[in-house]
Image (cartoon, helix red, strand yellow):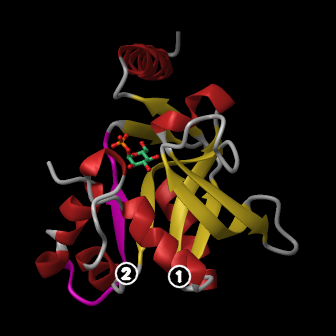
Amino acid sequence: MKGLGHAILTGETLIGDEPFAVILADDLCTAKDDAVLKQMIEVYEKYQCSVVAIEEVLLKETNKYGVIAGKLVDGTDDTYRVTDMVEKPDPKDTPTNMAIIGRYILTPDIFDILRNTKPGKGGEIQITDALLEQAKQGKVIAYKFKGKRFDCGSVDGFVEATNYFYKKEENV
Ligand code: G1P
C-alpha cells in the first residue's frame, strides 16, 4: 500500500545483511537459455552492486515504468552504469526509453536508504528513488536481459502470455 520501496523494506528482517533478488510476479519473463535472474546474478557477481533488468519500451509508455539513463560499460552492449533513474516519467520529460522491468538484485544497504526515502511518485515510497541514491555512487547496473517479458498486469499481456505458454507446452 505504501509502495514497492516500503514493501521491500518490510522484508529486511527475513533478508538481513546480504544481497537479494526482487521478483515482481506481474512481469513474467522467459528465456531460451539462462533464466533472467540467473543472467542477473552473473552480472551481480561481476560488478558487486545492485542490478536492475531493463528493456526498451515505446516512448509513449515510459509513464508506466521506472526509466534509467546510463553509460554502456566498456566492451558490452547490454550493460549500463546507471547515472539517472526516474519513476514513471511523462514521455516528454523522460531521459530515455529504457524501462525497468520487475527483476532486481539489491545490495542490503538499500534498506537504510529506503528508511530515509520520502514518498515520491503517487505518494508511494519508490524503489526507483532509493536506487537513484546508489546510482549517484556508481553502484547500480542496468542489464538488458536476453529473453521475453509479458506484462501480466494488463489483460492483453496476460492473454498473450497464456497463449505463448499454451503453444509452447502443446507444441502448436
Ligand atoms: C513497478 C516499479 C517500476 C517498474 C515496474 C516494472 O511499478 O515501480 O519502476 O518499472 O514495477 O513492472 P508498478 O508496475 O508496480 O506500478
CB at disc 1 and ligand 1 closer than 8 Å: no
**Mark 2 is on which residue type?**
Pro
Q: Which residues are magenta?
A: 15-25
Residue extending furthest bottom?
17
Q: Is residue 64 left or right of residue 92?
A: left
x%, y% of residue 27?
Answer: 40, 39
In the rendered image, the vertical position of residue 114 relative to residue 168, given as above or below: below
Mark 1, residue position: 49
Q: Residue at x 40, y 70 (%)?
A: 130
Kindly identify which numbered label has been placed on residue 19. 2
Q: Position of residue 107 (x, y in %)?
A: 40, 81
Can residue 154 be seen? yes
Residue at the right extreme?
A: 75
Residue at x 50%, y 40% (from the top left corner):
30
23 inside magenta stretch: yes
Give percent across and percent down for residue 44: 55, 77
Indicate which disc, 1 or 2, sits on the residue closer to the N terminus. Answer: 2
State which image quarter holds ligand 1: top left
